[in-house]
Amino acid sequence: MNKQVIAGAIMALVSAGATAQISIYGTVDTSLVGLNRFNPAGQSNKLVASSVWLPSVFGFRGAEDLGGGLQANFNLESDLNTDTGSYAGGPNSLFRRAATVGLSGEFGSFKFGRQLDHLFLQSFLNNIRLSHSGSAAVVGGLAYGLANANTSSDANIFRSNVLQYQSPSMMGLTVTGQYSLGETAGDSRANSAGTIGVNYAGFSGLDLNAVYQQSRNATGVTVSRNYLVGGKYSLGAATIATSFTHYENPSLVGAPVDANAIEIGGAYAITPATSAAVNYVRFDDDVADVKPHVVSVSLKYNFSKRTSVWGLVVQTDGKGRVPLSNLYGATVSGASFAGKSTGTAIGITHQF
């Protein structure tokens, strides 16, 4: 990576701030991790890991008032490994997480470019603690959601060539639609994907949502059809969250997938700065004919709005047939243990 090019890009963004609203933001998440039976050989390990609670990222956001309620905006976001200082997405993926430009106004918003798949994002938001590890979004996404991912996506999580529209809130109802172009000459359906989601937040403390997603392979065959319904409700110091996700490959092409995930979690604010949470995910895997599960408990203390320390324990059980990622950032699904595995982490997260 040419450091002069990066430095020049940053200086150009900062200079542009004189006429537009531009911010540099990020998250630094690092923890000390202990893993018991985390790989196929059933070995244990201790390590310093990045992105166990939240993804470690840095990015740029900007907006310009065009008048009449119309705004232009952009978002560039990259992820990194804080344990080594390396790019998490590899040498050719500087802005792997987001690279968008768009317009917004009373009509809603349009965004174009690289961005998170809406089903994955909503599944992440449905998690009780908004954490990578122990969540249906990440554990289920790695075990089932990335199967048969096409070349226009990164594991069906980050999608390229996306057109997205999000409606304004109408009595608490918001609709989001995404379409990822496959950019395959001669076949507009090849390597394409579509996602549509609905959110309802018409009552205080309540959020309900539903998302449908499908993607096609290089020959235009639908090889991934996933959907979810979920909700979260907060009352006083307590919050409960639940979701149901279905993963399916409806074709005879590619890896067979037919699984459901049920996630339920609860959190309680012990003090204004301290919160405890427990989360449970159960998968019903019709292909492997087993019911793997994930249980996690956590305790978090917020020094401020930006800095927190936390402890997390995650136990996965793939019932001997399904390798499940334990602590994200320290293990990966395909190289994980298929039996019972326990991970513990103590970490610090700072956002800027």
Image (spheres, helix red, strand yellow):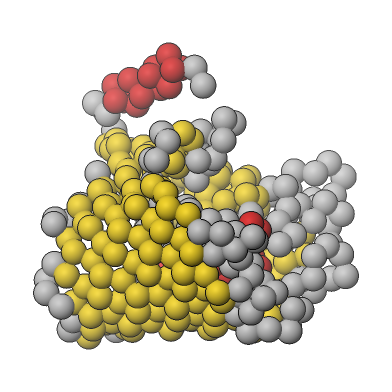
Which quarter of the rendered picture does the C terminus lie within? top left
Determine if residue 252 is in view: yes
Residue 282, compared with residue 328, is above or below; it is below
The x and y percentages for residue 44 are 51, 59
Q: 215 and 277: which one is in front?
A: 277
In this rendering, position of residue 44 left or right of residue 27: right
- Residue 292: image quadrant is bottom right
Give me the residue at 59% from left, 63% from top.
42
Q: 251 and 34: which one is in front?
A: 34
Q: 348 and 13: which one is in front?
A: 348
- Residue 171: image quadrant is bottom left
- Residue 221: image quadrant is bottom right
Give me the residue at 32% from left, 45% from top.
28
Determine if residue 178 is in view: no
The x and y percentages for residue 331 are 53, 56
In this rendering, position of residue 242 left or right of residue 307: right
The x and y percentages for residue 274 are 17, 70
The x and y percentages for residue 175 are 49, 69
